[in-house]
């Protein structure tokens, strides 16, 4: 079994980048959920860990959460959350397929 253990998804047409982001991936750096599915299928990768990127989205996990459904149960996620995220929000993320978090330590 093949697993991609760290992949980012960028879909700025459906999920706009945060306006205050210093870096916004573009061109060939953009990887939509559909494109990710095609690439993983071409290489017989059935499972992937989608990591919410700091670039472009900051603390906005909507693109990563939406992308989880494209894996038909084969994708799980790492969400980028504020340092003060409470247990209720973490349980909600868990129910959406998130198995870990990343904190932005500033």
Image: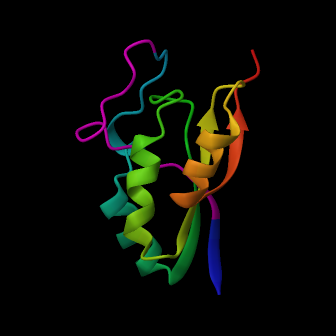
Is residue 6 within the magenta segment? yes
**Which residue is at the far front?**
88
Range shown magenta: 5-20
State whether residue 1 is above or below residue 21. below
**Which residue is at the far bottom?**
1
Is residue 66 within the magenta segment? no
Task: Determine the main secondary structure of the stretch shown in magenta.
Answer: loop
What is the x, y in percent for residue 47?
Answer: 57, 75
- Foreground of the two, 96 or 68: 96
State whether residue 83 is above or below residue 102. above
Residue 77 placement, left or right of 43 = right
- Foreground of the two, 32 or 78: 78
Residue 83 placement, left or right of 3 = right
Residue at (57% x, 67% y) in the render: 48
What is the x, y in percent for residue 34?
Answer: 31, 63
| Quadrant holding the C terminus | top right
Residue at (50% x, 84% y) in the render: 44
Residue at (49% x, 15% y) in the render: 22
Residue 88's quadrant in the figure?
top right
What is the x, y in percent for residue 19?
Answer: 37, 15
Residue 66 placement, left or right of 4 = left
**Which residue is at the far left?**
13
């Amino acid at each position: 079994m093949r697993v991609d253990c760290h992949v980012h998804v960028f879909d700025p047409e459906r999920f706009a980048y945060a306006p205050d982001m210093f870096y916004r991936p573009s061109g060939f750096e953009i990887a939509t959920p559909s494109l990710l599915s095609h690439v993983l299928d071409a290489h017989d990768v059935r499972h992937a860990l989608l990591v919410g990127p700091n670039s472009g989205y900051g603390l906005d996990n909507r693109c990563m959460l939406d992308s989880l459904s494209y894996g038909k149960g084969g994708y799980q996620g790492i969400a980028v959350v504020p340092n003060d995220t409470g247990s209720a929000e973490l349980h909600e993320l868990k129910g959406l397929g998130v198995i870990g978090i990343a904190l932005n330590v500033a």
